[in-house]
Amino acid sequence: RDLSLDEYVHEVLRTGHQYHIVTAAGVPSGFVTLQAVRSVPRDEWNNTSVQAVMVPLDKIPMVAPNEPATSVLERMQQEEINQVPVVSNGQIVGIIGRDTIVRALQTRLQIGHLA
């Protein structure tokens, strides 16, 4: 949470991931996206922390690992979000993005047409 937005952008460039779980002392406290960073003028990135632009966890819709992909995609569209944390037994076990779901559904459709 204490990373500057400039440091965070370097992490995005290094990993290619455009959204991350924000932690405080190892405990998840929020969610940050590249889109949130873009809401801050570039000349303020060094002096603005990730915590300043993150969305608190209690404001983020979450999904279960066994939730059908189509219902997750529908929730994402309703909430106008591109990714959600996946939670199992009260623990965040991953993050799923809209693009990943769409790609998986397209692949299943293609395989269905081949079978």
Image (tube, helix red, strand yellow):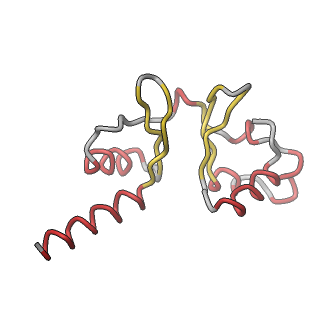
Above/below status of 91 relative to 40: above
Residue 85: give x, y in percent of width and height: 48, 39
Residue 81: give x, y in percent of width and height: 46, 49
Q: Which residue is depicted at the point 53% across and 26% down?
A: 58
Quarter of the figure with the N terminus = top right
Q: Which residue is depicted at the point 49% across and 27% down?
A: 91
Q: Is residue 112 left or right of residue 50?
A: left
Above/below status of 47 relative to 109: above
Near-viewer residue (104 or 42): 104
Count of numbered marks: 0
Q: Is residue 50 left or right of residue 95?
A: right
Residue at the front extreme of this rendering? 115
Q: Which residue is depicted at the point 41% across and 56% down?
A: 98
Residue 56: give x, y in percent of width and height: 60, 31
Residue at the bottom extreme of this rendering? 114
Q: Is residue 4 left or right of residue 62?
A: right
Residue 113: give x, y in percent of width and height: 13, 74
Occupied quadrant, residue 68: top left
Near-viewer residue (70 or 92): 92
Near-viewer residue (93 or 81): 93
Quarter of the figure with the C terminus = bottom left
Above/below status of 39 relative to 88: below
Q: Which residue is depicted at the point 46% across and 23% down?
A: 90
Near-viewer residue (36 or 94): 94
Above/below status of 59 relative to 112: above
Occupied quadrant, residue 31: top right
